[in-house]
Image (tube, rainbow, N blue to C red):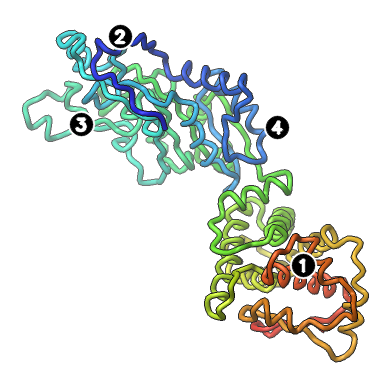
Amino acid sequence: MSDRPEIFTLGELRASGHVHKDLRREIRENLLAALAASRDPWPGIYGFSRTVLPQLERALIAGHDLVLLGERGQGKTRLLRTLAGLLDEWSPAIEGSELNEHPYEPITEQSKARVLTEADRLRVTWRHRSERYVEKLATPDTSVADLIGDVDPMRVAEGRRLGDPETIHYGLVPRSNRGIVAINELPDLAERIQVAMLNVMEERDIQIRGYVLRLPLDVLVVASANPEDYTNRGRIITPLKDRFGAEIRTHYPLELDDEVAIIRQEGRLAADVPPVIVEILARYTRSLRQSPAINQGSGVSARFAIAGAETVAAAALRRSTVRGEANAVSRMVDLEAAMEVLTGKLEFESGEEGREEAVLDHLLRMATAEAVRLHYRGLDFGPLVAALDGHTTVTTGDEVTAREFLDSLPSLNGSGLYEEIGARLNAKNDGQRASAIELALEGLFLARRISKESDGRETIYG
């Protein structure tokens, strides 16, 4: 963040050569400058570069209010928040103005009078771009007063008449003048509130209790909604739909790498989660989105995989703390345990009662098998399978340390298979080596080359 400009009066602002730009021009110019310089205007956004972002950029260049349509967990809110980065870092406003009016373009009678009387002595304050982005979660109890404003009875009691603009207590939208207003879950607004937004978006004026205030508000209205709620059968009124210049459909990541990047970026991981474990989580999440057993209208949020990675990391940290391990590294046993607490984040189809656990277990096995085939392709597991053919077993569990697991592995009579397995996943310590070999054992079980028994606490391969 750069320093706040050392300009404190209207006279100093004029002397600096500052040029006033309306909001849409400001966003357009900053976006085009970023694109021309090959600078990413959308930091932290993955999977939308060829689909959503070009549509969004065209809408902003055109100066349109816009709505993002998509199922939960597709990154709609995060994408809207990046819009603040397209605003000028610092913007001047009349000091004390409720509506953040530009010193060159006052819109209320009070501010116009101040500009005339104080002239170049008018005090100027500076607002950071982060202050010019305002977000509101739409709820059924949101009122017109919350968004637009209401008559302030205290000001009326002081002797002002009802039609006096000074009796108005402004709501969120007017107070966001010269900024971006983001409304999440737009259809959840009651119809009367949606009606109140019509004039704001079309005429840029506001109506409060029958009084029309001709305030040329300079706001960009952006919103998010679930597609089902935004259709003609949904809860959005048609005139409000018509006010949005662009309706942009979002989607879940189309590529596995984007899914992994989102998990890594958003997950607050308390321990080392090897890349292959994150990959399995990403594959698992993607398979859930394609499963007919899962209600796809509800969607499978990216937060599912993020929560999974965080839970897996927490399980590893707990084990290392309880058992005194030097390195907290997640393993397959942690992934299986994490799935037990994530089931509630999914919505199954009505005919799947009683089959939930079987469905999830099958999909996790499929995701694991895909990762094993990709990373261990070409390895000869014959020595390990042969070593486990007799009465030899390998035990793991959520409280079995990496060292205990490695010590329980059978000797392979000079074979370097264990080292090769670790090298495939770039394992550097005992925890990472144990994680890599445990994944290999799970892969052998899924390929029906060895057996597996589990009682919920310990898992035995043999």
Task: Identify the residue under disc 1.
Answer: 365
Cβ–Cβ under 8 Å for marks 4 and 3 = no
Closer to the camera in the image, 154 or 76: 76
Mark with earlier residue (4, 3): 4
- Is 22 left, or right, of 77 in this rendering? left
Q: Quick check: can you spot residue 298?
A: no
Mark with earlier residue (1, 3): 3
107, above or below 390, in the image: above
Task: Identify the residue under disc 2.
Answer: 14
Indicate which disc residue 168 carries: none
Task: Identify the residue under disc 4.
Answer: 50
Farthest residue, direction front: 414
Hey, what amino acid is under mark 1?
Answer: Arg
Task: Identify the residue under disc 3.
Answer: 151
Q: Quick check: can you spot residue 266?
A: yes
Cα distance in 3D space between marks 1 and 3:
61 Å
Cα distance in 3D space between marks 2 and 3:
36 Å
- Is 353 left, or right, of 246 in this rendering? right
Percent from the top left, x then y, of residue 97? 24, 24
Cβ–Cβ under 8 Å for marks 2 and 1 = no
Hey, what amino acid is under mark 2?
Answer: Arg
Mark with earlier residue (4, 2): 2
Cα distance in 3D space between marks 4 and 1:
32 Å
421, above or below 68, in the image: below
